[in-house]
Image (tube, rainbow, N blue to C red):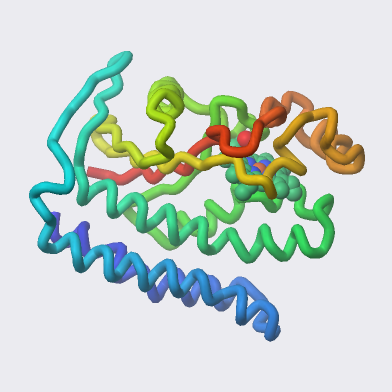
Amino acid sequence: MNKRFYSPLLLAPLIFVACNTTQPTTKAQETKEAPVVEVAEKNVLKEESIIQPKATTKKVATTTINGVKFVNKPLIEEQGLFHIKSFVGTLQPTLDSAMKDSVATGMGVCMSIDTAGEYNALTTDTKISRTALKYRNEKNKPDATDTTAMKELVRKGDFKAITVDAGDHYRVYKPLPTKGECLVCHGDSSKIPSKISEMINRKYPKDLAVDFAEGEFRGTVVAEIKK
Ligand code: HEC
């Protein structure tokens, strides 16, 4: 348990090295890498505070909905969120630079599967993925557990993470709100610039991920943690 708990800390330098090596070190890129380091540092501090958890912060509860067991495991949730935040941190510069070049060339860069693959290659006991009830890429299609978990996230509506006990592993779900900047590719389909909607239709003919409003639940990043 302890060994697994500390593993995210050991990964932090690895993630940083990976970011440094996968991106060209121009001046502009250097400044963009800063948030990744911050994310890692912030979580290191968080991990420390968890070593002496405050008994009053969370109540212990287990609920089962549609056979899916929702659990309250603060340490597991923290470990999952650490990986999720590191992963999202590595994506942000990619999305930012894609948006700066041209929104159209940003297609497929948005939190791309390959980036998740690169991240997952660095981790052993945790796998990161993304899913949504209305998804764009069929590879991100939710399974029954994901669907139940996301319906619960929508019902709660507070954008707080939840954890599921899925037998041999836990799944930590971090809900993603639709932000203003997401609307250009996920918003009102009649307002998506034609250049972008053409590309979406070509690459994702069965796209479901449009007509989101700002603030609406867009989907979730999932950390699957082996028991
Ligand atoms: C430049 C266009 C673009 C922007 C802006 C954009 N996305 Fe996406 N998004 C995509 C594309 C394309 C995919 C499919 C990627 C793939 O093939 O995995 C996608 C996939 C996703 C997925 C994975 C689930 C699915 O539908 O397949 C999530 C979650 C998501 N986007 C959330 C967001 C959020 C949140 C924002 C704003 C912070 C955002 N996106 C901004 C184009 C965009």
Q: Is 195 placed left or right of 125 in the picture?
A: right
Q: Is 97 placed left or right of 222 in the picture?
A: right
The residue lying toward the viewer, choosing from 45 and 213, is 213
The residue lying toward the viewer, choosing from 26 and 41, is 41
Above or below residue 202? Residue 121 is below
Answer with the quarter of the image where residue 195 lies. top right
Q: Residue at x 33, y 50 (%)?
A: 80
Q: Position of residue 92 (x, y in %)?
A: 59, 61
Q: Position of residue 17 (x, y in %)?
A: 48, 77
Q: Residue furthest right?
A: 194
Above or below residue 180? Residue 102 is below
Q: Residue furthest bottom?
A: 27
Q: Quadrant of the C terminus?
A: top left
Q: Position of residue 214 (x, y in %)?
A: 63, 38
Q: Residue at x 21, y 57 (%)?
A: 4
Q: Residue furthest top?
A: 66
The residue lying toward the viewer, choosing from 157 and 42, is 157
Q: Quadrant of ligand 1?
A: top right
Q: Residue at x 46, y 55 (%)?
A: 120
Q: Quadrant of the N terminus?
A: bottom left
Q: Is residue 112 visible?
A: no
Q: Position of residue 69 (x, y in %)?
A: 25, 25
